[in-house]
């Protein structure tokens, strides 16, 4: 199944995505067994971030090639950071490059695990079973700010810097796919999605030793490659078996 959230009449509504229509649902499929309350055509859907997570977890430096490129040390255990929900935006919504951003302004294509149950002290098998489904994230980063600041507060968390969507796919092995990054239709990166140092379940096991995870939490899994973005670009991230997350890039104050 493919589940998402769409804007209907100014409010967020869960939906089940078909070939041509999105069935509008009475509640979150993560929390219950929703009924169908309406319909909207896929072509007319106003896509929202697929979930607003209780906690937004993010993994960094989790692909060997990215670690080599960054001249960083390979992690010896799974660790996570955090991102801010204000940075989330949906499929087809613009990524806004803020005034004052100079230098590298980059996309990072990421697999995202959506958690479907409450977890503490999870085993590896319990971690596998806890994933409700998989979606796609674009970890937009302003590198100059990243190097200037003591934390990632603006370089990773500015408004619109975290597109996520277009839907949650529940019937796929997220780690057995291929991730492809395109800018204006041109392939800029392609890699095996599962070629990670530590997989999502390793991270969930480590996380839940100390922190309770809840339904709707998301875990972004890092990227092998990055790519420069400019206003006027359209960036597409495809993960086979899941879908394509597409977003235009705008300048702050210039919506075109």
Image (cartoon, rainbow, N blue to C red):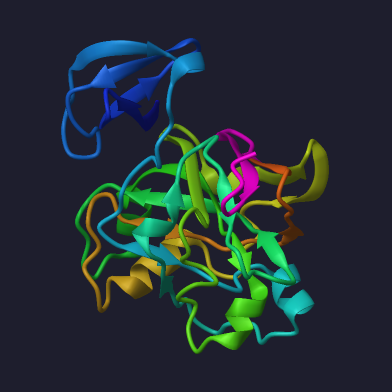
Q: Is residue 100 magenta?
A: no
For the C terminus, which image quadrant? top right
Vertical placement of residue 18 versus 222, above or below: above
Q: Nearer the viewer, residue 179 or 256?
A: 256
Residue 57 is drawn in which quadrant? bottom left
112 vs 144, nearest the viewer: 144
Give the x, y percent position of residue 34: 18, 24
- Figure quadrant of residue 2: top left
**Where, quadrant-wise, is the N terminus in this rendering?**
top left
The answer to whether residue 176 is left or right of residue 183 is left
Q: Position of residue 129 (x, y in %)?
A: 33, 49
Whether residue 54 is situated above or below residue 133 in the rendered picture: below
The verdict on residue 244 being magenta is yes
Q: Residue at x 38, y 53 (%)?
A: 128
Total count of labels: 0
Q: Locate residue 85 relative to residue 238 in the image: left or right.
A: left
Residue range of the region highlighted in magenta in the rendering? 238-256
Q: At 73% across and 69% down in the image, what residue appears?
A: 104
Q: Position of residue 94 (x, y in %)?
A: 56, 43
Compare residues 76 and 66 and report the one nearer the observer: 66
Of residues 139 and 95, the one drawn nearer to the viewer in this rendering: 95
Residue 196 coordinates in the image, percent (x, y): 61, 64
Q: Quadrant of residue 186?
A: top right
| In the depicted structure, whether residue 210 falls above or below residue 27 | below
What residue appears at the point 48 percent right and 64 percent down from the top-left corner?
A: 158
């Amino acid at each position: 199944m493919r589940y998402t959230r769409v804007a209907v009449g100014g409010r967020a509504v869960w939906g089940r995505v078909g070939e041509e229509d999105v069935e509008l649902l009475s509640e979150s499929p993560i929390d219950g067994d929703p009924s169908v309350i309406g319909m909207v055509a896929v072509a007319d859907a106003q896509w929202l971030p697929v979930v607003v997570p209780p906690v937004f977890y993010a993994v960094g430096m989790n692909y060997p090639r990215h670690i080599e490129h960054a001249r960083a040390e390979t992690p010896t255990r799974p660790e996570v950071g955090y991102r801010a929900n204000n940075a989330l935006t949906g499929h087809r919504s613009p990524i806004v490059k803020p005034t004052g951003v100079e230098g590298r302004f980059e996309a990072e294509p990421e697999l995202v695990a959506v958690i479907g149950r409450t977890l503490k002290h999870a085993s590896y098998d319990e971690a596998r079973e806890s994933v409700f489904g998989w979606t796609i994230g674009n970890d937009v980063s302003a590198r100059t700010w990243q190097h200037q600041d003591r934390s990632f507060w603006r370089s990773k968390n500015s408004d619109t810097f975290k597109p996520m969507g277009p839907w949650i796919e529940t019937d796929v092995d997220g780690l057995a796919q291929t991730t492809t990054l395109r800018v204006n239709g041109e392939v800029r990166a392609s890699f095996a999605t599962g070629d990670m140092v530590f997989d999502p379940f390793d991270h969930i096991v480590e996380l839940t030793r100390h922190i309770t995870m809840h339904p709707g939490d998301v875990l972004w899994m890092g990227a092998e490659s990055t790519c420069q973005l400019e206003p006027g670009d359209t960036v597409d991230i495809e993960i086979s078996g899941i879908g394509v997350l597409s977003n235009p890039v705008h300048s702050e104050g210039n919506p075109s």
